Amino acid sequence: MKLTRTLTAMAMASMMVISLAACGGGADQKGGATEAATEAATQAAAGAEAAAPGGGNIGVCIYKFDDAFMTTYRNALQEILEGKGYTVTFMDGKNDQAEQNNQINNFIAQEVDALIINPVMTSAADQIIATVKEAGIPTVLINREPTAEQMAAYDKLVYVGCDARQSGTMQGELILDTPNKGDINGDGKVSYIMIQGDPENVDAQYRTEFSVKALTDAGMEVEELDLQRGDWDRNKGQEIAQNDLAKFGDEIEVIFCNNDDMAIGALQAIQAANRKVNEDIYLVGVDALDAALNEVVNGNMTGTVLNDAKGQAAGAVEAMEALLGGKTYASGEQSIYVDYVKVTPENAADFQ
């Protein structure tokens, strides 16, 4: 691989400097030459280390380019990697796991130095891990976390992302922080609908579970009026909310959305139904997309949760460079988390 060859060449250059210096003249010359050689070797080694980031070809697989959050993430990755001198190629999986598998195999055939993969399907983790392990390519998985048991199969593999349980808990806390803790009609329970992302995705599973768990852990009684799959899509979020608002009307006190895009769609349905967020209904999302931050500031969303794309991108590159430097990860130590941040009308402007 190009990066390995670069480092080897630098190391050989260092050895040649030392060898030539050792062939010098008298004692004084030898002493001076040895010191010079040592200094040169040190500088060469430092140069090799510094050159490492600039010499690598990196393949990045994104599950689909038109996902709003992953667009932010992808742009952050590109800025960081190219800023460090890497040659980076991004591939759009088009939400098709078979397509992404082909892209991974093509990157391997091209002998990229490392891979950063946002899997289309979490259930494909075993196959992805087996493929990169066989090729011996250092790999960072992002955004969709496999199990610890799956990752333990390969010690040059690490996951960088957020713990989705935290984001779900924060969504619930946003509701608990309202004056009536989500019980707008005062009947002693919080009646909600849940617009879920992809139920096969662990983030969707945890956000769905832990948002409600935060309420019940606080002693609130809850009533699930509906739970539907919105596939992270704004239009689907709008359609689900519209249908549920027509069906359940004022019974709906809270709309939980697994991401901001679906929440913005739900907001369109809320406004069309002449409901008012933070007065007769609450609405929360996840990601802190710019569009959602604007709605939080304007009082049209109760809150959201920052899914720090830039922080995760920086963490992914840092982990990738550690792997390229020879680091391996023991079982149980392969997940690196970036904290979520609760976003309210009071602090939303800080993230715009």
Image: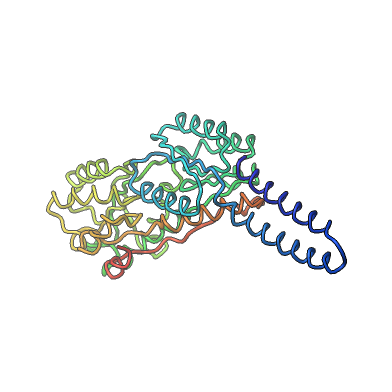
The vertical placement of 316 against 124, above or below, is: below
Residue 295, by quadrant, is bottom left
Which residue is situated farthest in the right direction here? 27
Residue 214 vs residue 313, the one in the foreground = 313
Residue 26, percent from left and from top: 87, 65
User: Foreground residue, 212 or 167?
Assistant: 167
* Residue at horizontal 58 percent and vertical 36 percent from the top: 111
Question: Where's the N terminus, which quadrant?
Answer: top right
Residue under the image location 55 percent in, 36 percent down: 128
Q: How many marks?
A: 0
User: Which residue is more in the foreground, 169 or 163?
Assistant: 163
- Residue at 29 percent across and 61 percent down: it is 303
**Residue 81, percent across and down?**
48, 51
Residue reaching furthest to the front: 25
In percent of width and height, residue 168 lies at 40, 56
Residue 345 visible in the snapshot = yes
Position in image of residue 219 (x %, y %): 38, 64
The color scheme shown is: rainbow
Judged left or right of residue 204, residue 238 is left
For image coordinates 63% across by 35% down, the residue present is: 135
Q: Nearer the viewer, residue 211 or 187?
A: 211
